Amino acid sequence: MPIWNPRVETMSRVDLEQLQLERLQAVVNRIWDSVAFYRRRFEQGGLIPERIRSLDDLRLLPLTVKEDLRTGYPYDLFAVPLREVVRIHASSGTTGHPTVVGYTKNDLRHWRELVARVLSAGGMTKEDVIQIAFSYGLLTDAFGLHQGAEEIGASVIPMSGGAAEQQISIMQDFRTTALVGTPSYALQIAEALEEKGVARSSLHLRWGMFGAEPWSEPLRQRIESLLGISATDNYGISEVMGPGVSGECEEQKNGLHINEDHFLCEIIDPDSGEVLPPGQTGELVITTLTTEALPIIRYCTGDLTSLHLQPCPCGRTFARMARISGRTDDTFVIGGVKVFPSQIEEVLLQIEGIEPNYLVVVDRESGADTVQVQVEVPGALLTGDVRHLLRTQEILRQRLERALGLTIEVKLVEPRTIAGPRERKQKVIDRRKEVTP
């Protein structure tokens, strides 16, 4: 597939690292002058901008966490006057103040360019009709991908969320060739095709680009099989711009190419804060290199991944990040055993007729930790042969316990009890936090 900006995306590591250092020094000087929050942090650590002489000095800079942005709500971390901000987005704010991000005209220009790179890597061109199934609103997903699709010259259908049946109808009538949304919603659309008896051949779909939640390789294969598409992953986080941070190339599908000329990425141990070498899994930390309105230094994303520097056959020289395996706040520990939701998803995908729509409830009863996995199953299974239902429940329990090394309770629930056309689904509820010692 063509590379959107080959001059940049194939530059040598030597040239790239020199560019990164120059931009890092520039952004450190800018936030020292313009953002009181960062200046205080620097002074508390006895740090001045002149100390940053190499990329290795990045680890001298303070980490930024989501709570810092919430405390600075709404504009305290902006580095430009509000009159220079031409767009404002925000998170949902379901657990307190939302995190607010602003964009200057240059920021929007960069954003369009970076999303265009990711879409091109995923196989899409100006010949495509791209249906956006993210909800349009304060979140960055829909608008970011929309403007990038327009940048490559594609036709864009701003469908937003809604019932899967409506999505299918628009796909048929408008001859959609690419679907963009969450992987769980793509799976719902695929399920609706089967339920309604709609032939896959009635669609023109060729590509899918999905993100905003962790998803496994087996789930990718399931979506590709059901929809007859090539599905790629992309990554973004609103605090450092939105979609466009990285994306898989359609040729390789083995790691997401990071737009390293705009983002400097590290992997740290989420417990100690120690920077980890390439190949080791930890928390992704991002420093913005070109953002004007909201420059962010060493932002702790909470997403778990690893970095890889090996050359890619597609020709791009940017480092790749492994697909997100989970979040630091989704991971739960039982008896010293760390469990990631992706491990549960992989087990569910191995059982015919079971879709990976699930919820994990961790609780504490009589001083002992318990794990219940609620799994959606087809309605016919719940109303059919009771012995078959119990056998399915027992198979699930045995396979989950074998995979996780834990005692698991499995509860089978009706379709769409857990899943819905939401932007991001909660995978784990840890009620131990609510228990009084």
Image (tube, rainbow, N blue to C red):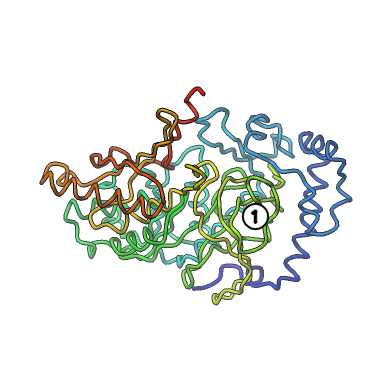
Looking at the image, residue 355 lies above or below residue 119? above
Q: Is residue 290 visible?
A: no
Judging from the image, what secondary structure is the residue with disc 1 in? strand
Across and down, in percent, residue 241 comes to 60, 47
**Pointer 1 residue:** 267
Camera-side residue of 42 and 129: 42
| Residue type, label 1 | Ile
Q: How many marks?
A: 1
Across and down, in percent, residue 30 comes to 80, 45
Camera-side residue of 123 and 258: 258
Looking at the image, residue 24 lies above or below residue 123? above
Looking at the image, residue 199 lies above or below residue 105? below
Q: Is residue 424 left or right of residue 299?
A: left
The residue at the point 75 percent across, 70 percent down is 15
Q: Label 1: how many residues lie within 10 Å, few (<14), some (14-19) or many (20+)?
A: many
Q: Is residue 404 visible?
A: yes
Q: Is residue 296 left or right of residue 56?
A: left
Q: Is residue 170 left or right of residue 305?
A: left
The residue at the point 58 percent across, 28 percent down is 97
